[in-house]
Amino acid sequence: MENLSVEEKRRIVEETIEKYMKYLNPGLARLYKFANLTTVEWRGEGAKVFDIFGEAYIDCIGGFGVFNVGRNHPRVVERVIEQLQRLPLSSRTLFNKHQADLAEMLAAITPGNLQYSFFCNSGAEAVEGALKLARLYTKRKKFVSALGGFHGKTFGALSVSGRDVYKKPFEPLLPGTEQVPFNDLKAMERAVDEDTAAVILEPIQGEGGVILPSSEYLKGVREICTRKGALLILDEVQTGLGRTGKMFACEHYGVVPDILTLAKGLGGGVVPLGAFVSTAEIWQVFEDNPLIHSSTMGGNPLSCVAGIETLKVLQEEDIPAQAAAKGAYLLEKLEELQREFPEIIQEVRGLGLLIGVELFDADAASLLAMEMAQRKVLVAYTLNNPRVIRLEPPLTITREEIDTVLSALYDALRGVQAIVQEVRG
Ligand code: PLP
């Protein structure tokens, strides 16, 4: 494929876009075209994705936070290839060593007494499983979650998410769900009652616009849940596995959930893999009927070896600490940019390498993403707050690459500034 002529590569790009228009998602194709993203991705390495022409982009979206160990980490790829040739999928009737090993590793690194894991393929599936487990254990029905929260787009996960534009067209959703403002303990206190099975929250809201909890919030929610007999589900699909500078974001706040959900980075950015993890006490409810929750593809050997190698890399290369140091540097530089462009940037905030740049205007945020794409840096707005541009690169991004992102951002902001001034006359 690398030997294709430029004409052939151009044809592939044109045909791919046409097929998106004809067979996939015309609206999305128009959106990509509008954002100047009219090329085809071809190869990945570290923090970069290369298009079919060999043009490198620094990927600050990273599949919405998938590439914690960097793209195509050689150790993960090697293990996956070896497993692929031997036994990629499971019989689902014999014991599977890799699933068992991965569950043991998760029990060792997850906080508190979280011990048992169920493996699936995506974040939304992990959330669905967590919600079901909470109902099964508590024999209660209701769920409380946060406005602006994002937990996925399957029915249950969507029901506990917090943005109407994605929910309204699909109503009726799961009954007995309520969303309260994030960081508001009084509202949480009012919402959780004797029929609440669980509160589900992201420790740091990702798609909501990178919203950090106040120092007392998560501890307060933990206390409310414990007092009222509801479970606390922390959704670390986006914040987990080093992203925020610790292995799990809840560790920043000294809070242990009853159920933890993971996905995105768990498969090393090579194979899809999700999980929900809980305690031995809660897991007992699966004893009566061990098949009450199951998945054909979940926990397949291919994804589990990717997960095992990913966890080893995260620990051995101390990737959470890397994310903390690089994130602090990036945030400091972004604060300087905010001081330089106070009429465009309202606030910058984040933890580790989950960073949001909040602009005053959603159109300016789209413009900024387009300007960045022209400068070969991929960024995007957060799904539940289009005024926030997220920066969540692979955690292995180098200092030099961060500096390249910053200088592209400076130029892009100048571009946005010029357009805004022209529009205002
Ligand atoms: N939970 C959180 C916190 C997420 O950020 C996401 C996706 O962005 C999901 C769940 C859903 O994950 P998936 O897209 O893999 O279903």
Image (cartoon, helix red, strand yellow):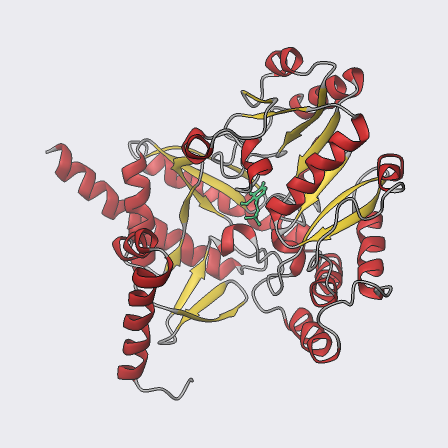
**Where residue 27 sits in the image (x, y, percent)?**
31, 51
Q: Nearer the viewer, residue 281 or 336?
A: 281
The answer to whether residue 403 is above or below residue 345 is: below
Q: How many marks?
A: 0
Residue at image point 83% right, 37% down? 112
- Quadrant of the rendered image containing residue 288: top right
Observer able to see residue 374: yes
Residue at image point 50% right, 47% down? 330
Q: Quadrant of the N terminus?
A: bottom left
Q: Nearer the viewer, residue 136 or 397?
A: 136
The answer to whether residue 291 is above or below residue 376 is: above
Observer able to see residue 252: no
**Where residue 84 sits in the image (x, y, percent)?**
69, 76
**Where residue 66 sits in the image (x, y, percent)?**
57, 55
Q: Quadrant of the C terminus?
A: top left
Residue at image point 89% right, 42% down? 287
Which of the four quarters of the rendered structure image does ligand 1 lie in? Answer: top right
The answer to whether residue 200 is above or below residue 392 is: above
Looking at this view, name the residue that lies furthest to the bottom: 3
- Quadrant of the rendered image containing residue 238: top right
Q: Is residue 79 left or right of residue 104?
A: left
**Where residue 40 sits in the image (x, y, percent)?**
37, 68
